[in-house]
Image (cartoon, helix red, strand yellow):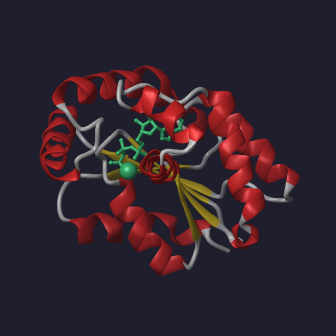
Amino acid sequence: MYNLVVFGAPGSGKGTQSARLIDEYGLYHISTGELLRDHIARDTELGRIADSYISKGQLIPDDLMIDILEHTLNENPETANGVIFDGFPRTIEQAKALKSMLAKRGSKVHAVVGLEVPDEELMDRLVKRGAESGRSDDNPETINNRLKVYNAQTAPLRDYYVGEGKYHAIKGSGAIDDIFNSIKEALRDTRE
Ligand code: ATP
Ligand code: MG
């Protein structure tokens, strides 16, 4: 059992590194961004609600997001063996909810990987991705707002997890393989 939070700004590489980490550690991957985009693609009721926030670069309200996460844990019993949380929590309230959801299941967050990338590079990456991804939130105006929202609502989580002694800062720029190796190195003694 091992629960890992992959944390970082939009475009910091959470999805890319999470994909490698699930192979390496055999954990269940929960990407809240992918989950919401899947609902949008299927045009479900949740998808329509989610799109109204995502396309403006805003966060989905905490109550709703926490509900979705709890459902995902309940519907996928494999999650009891360990999860990579990619894109969740994004607020202190979500972090507190995650803590109690895991405590209810006799577990906890074992470690947090924080991918740290300078703002200019994030902007660059997201604009480039926007040209290929077709994502409604990868355009310059929305990107700007996502970075603002990140700094105001999500970045404070860094201190929250530093306070819990769980935060591992990783330099998130450079080669994908090098970043992956520094994550493995940082996590080595967090895995029993
Ligand atoms: P990365 O490129 O590092 O994977 P990202 O910025 O592309 O990061 P996603 O995790 O794919 O981000 O999320 C896309 C959008 O989905 C967010 O901007 C937000 O609107 C919504 N979202 C995802 N997770 C959450 C969450 N935990 N709380 C609220 N909104 C969320
Ligand atoms: Mg993503």
Q: Residue 108's x, y, as percent?
A: 74, 55
Q: Position of residue 13 (x, y in %)?
A: 31, 54
Horizontal arrangement in the rendering, residue 21 relative to residue 93 (left or right): left
Counting every numbered tag in the picture gives 0
Q: Looking at this view, is 117 or 190 the one in front?
A: 117
In the drawing, does residue 64 fall left or right of residue 103? left
Please state, as top left, top right, bottom left or bottom right, where the N terminus lies in the image. Answer: bottom right
Horizontal side of residue 119 vs 148, given as left or right? left
Q: Quadrant of residue 76?
A: bottom right
What residue is shown at x 67% (from left), y 68% (from top)? 82
Residue 2 x/y as whole percent? 66, 68
The quadrant of the image that shows the C terminus is bottom right
Q: Image point 34% across, 68% down: which residue?
A: 180
In this view, the residue in front, 94 or 31, is 31
* In the image, residue 60 above or below residue 6: above
Q: Nearer the viewer, residue 187 or 37?
A: 37
User: Picture coordinates of residue 189 (x, y %)?
Assistant: 57, 69
At 53% from the left and 77% from the top, the residue drawn is 25
In the image: residue 131, left or right of residue 188: left
Write the residue at 35% across / 65% down: 182
